[in-house]
Image (cartoon, rainbow, N blue to C red):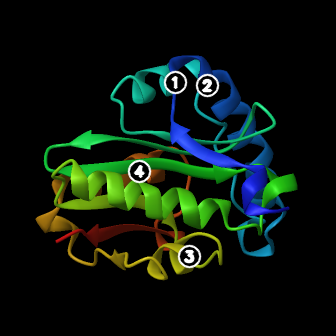
Amino acid sequence: MNPSDWSVRLAHPEDAEAFTEVEEDAARLLRDAPSLARVTIPPPRSSAEYRAIIAQRQSLASVAAGRIIGFAAARPAGRELHLHELNVARAYQRNGIGGTLLRALQIDARNAGFASITVHTFRDIAWNAPFFAAYGFTEVTDLSRHPRLAAGQDAAVEAGLPSDIRCAMICLLD
């Protein structure tokens, strides 16, 4: 796939259903990851949830041939931008789309005056925490200083995800 075969743009409300479909497709990789064999992967967000996130006007979509192939769903949390999901459809992975979405999100967030971007992710899955680390994210080890991130970690545990496999990360933008 050539870089000219796809583009990145601001997400539109009508993209919400495609976001759910891309998340479901990408989640199959998590379900197949040996280190997550004992873990039940939560279902994707609903289209209504994605519409609410997209309404905040901070989410990006990657498009090829008029079809959503990837996205970064984010919304403000004070001076931070929280990245709820970054997904690329499996057929389009390993073409730089996820990295381009993340770099574009960082540029947009910096230009909009956000101090940082935060995310909750799987700690040891190569396309999760190590991927984010390559783009300047670091693990938040003292969650007592980040109550919102601590609450997100707690919610993941309540949803059935073991606490030792999840982490919160932050990328400072200044």
Disc 1 crowd rating (10 Å Cα; few below 14, some 14-19, many 20+) is some
Taking 133 as reference, is 140 left or right? left
Disc 3 crowd rating (10 Å Cα; few below 14, some 14-19, many 20+) is some
Q: Amino acid at mark 2?
A: Asp
Indicate whether 98 appears above or below 127: above
SS of the residue under disc 3: helix
Q: Which residue bears the numbered disc 1? A: 12
* Of the two numbered discs 2 and 4 in the rendering, the one whose residue sits closer to the viewer: 2
Q: Quadrant of the C terminus?
A: bottom left
Q: Which residue bears the numbered disc 2? A: 15
Instruction: Specify which label sits upstream in the sequence, 3 or 1.
Output: 1
What is the CA distance from the residue labelled 4 to the residue labelled 3? 14 Å
* Of the two numbered discs 3 and 1 in the rendering, the one whose residue sits closer to the viewer: 1
Q: Position of residue 147 (x, y in %)?
A: 17, 55
What is the CA distance from the residue labelled 2 to the residue labelled 4? 17 Å
Q: Are marks 2 and 1 in contact (CB under 8 Å)?
A: yes
Indicate whether 160 appears above or below 36: above
Q: Position of residue 8 (x, y in %)?
A: 58, 46
Indicate whether 143 appears above or below 23: below
Q: Which mark is residue 83?
A: 4
Q: Which residue bears the numbered disc 3? A: 131
SS of the residue under disc 2: helix
